[in-house]
Image (tube, helix red, strand yellow):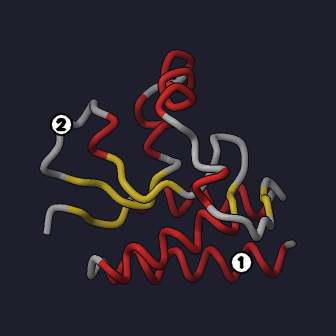
Amino acid sequence: MSISLNPQAVIYAKRLIRDGNIKNDEGHWSEHNPNTEEENAFLEEHEIEEYGNWHLGIDTSKGENTKGRFKYPYGDFKSVHRDGLIAVKERAAQQGCTDIENAADQLLKALEENA
């Protein structure tokens, strides 16, 4: 499988959670997940590596400097979202990405402890 865990994003999410940059929301991730316009606006001001920090998965079959390389978003470029981590965990489980599923679960537990 060409999608693997993005360890840099896990480190980044842990730091955000530790610093209290969290949203303990219970809505649907589709309500909070950044849309294409918001992603493009973020990339106008930030490097692709920073964009990647907001995604727990990397698709190595995609070009290194493309948005398509990054999968499983968990936040809105400001905060880690509870519903984002739940969505990542569920989707990763459905797609057989156990390492991403486990990372999302650990981050979710850390978020809930800090909320």
Q: Which x, y percent locates residue 58?
A: 30, 55
Closer to the camera in the image, 11 or 33: 33
Residue type pointed to by label 1: Ala
| Residue shown at 71% from the left, 42% from the top | 78
Q: Is residue 21 left or right of residue 36?
A: right
> In which quarter of the view is residue 38 placed?
top right
Asked if residue 68 lies left or right of residue 16, the reply is: left
Residue 88 sits above or below residue 44 on the image? below
Residue 51's spot in the image, x, y percent? 48, 37
| Crowd rating for badge 1 (residues with CA inside 10 Å; few <14, some 14–19, many 20+) | some
Residue at the spot 73% in from the left edge and 65% down from the top edge: 27
How far, Cα to Cα, is label 2 from label 1? Answer: 32 Å
Where does the image place residue 41, in percent across and percent down from the top left?
55, 21
When asked about the image quadrant of residue 64, the answer is top left
Q: Residue at x 34, y 83 (%)?
A: 98
User: What residue is shown with label 2?
Assistant: 63
**Is disc 2 placed on a helix, strand or loop?**
loop
Q: Within the image, what quadrant is residue 13 found in? A: bottom right
Would you place residue 97 above or below residue 33 in this image? Answer: below
Q: Quadrant of the C terminus?
A: bottom right
N-terminal-most mark, 2 or 1: 2
Residue designated by label 1: 110
Residue 67, x across and y down, in percent: 34, 36
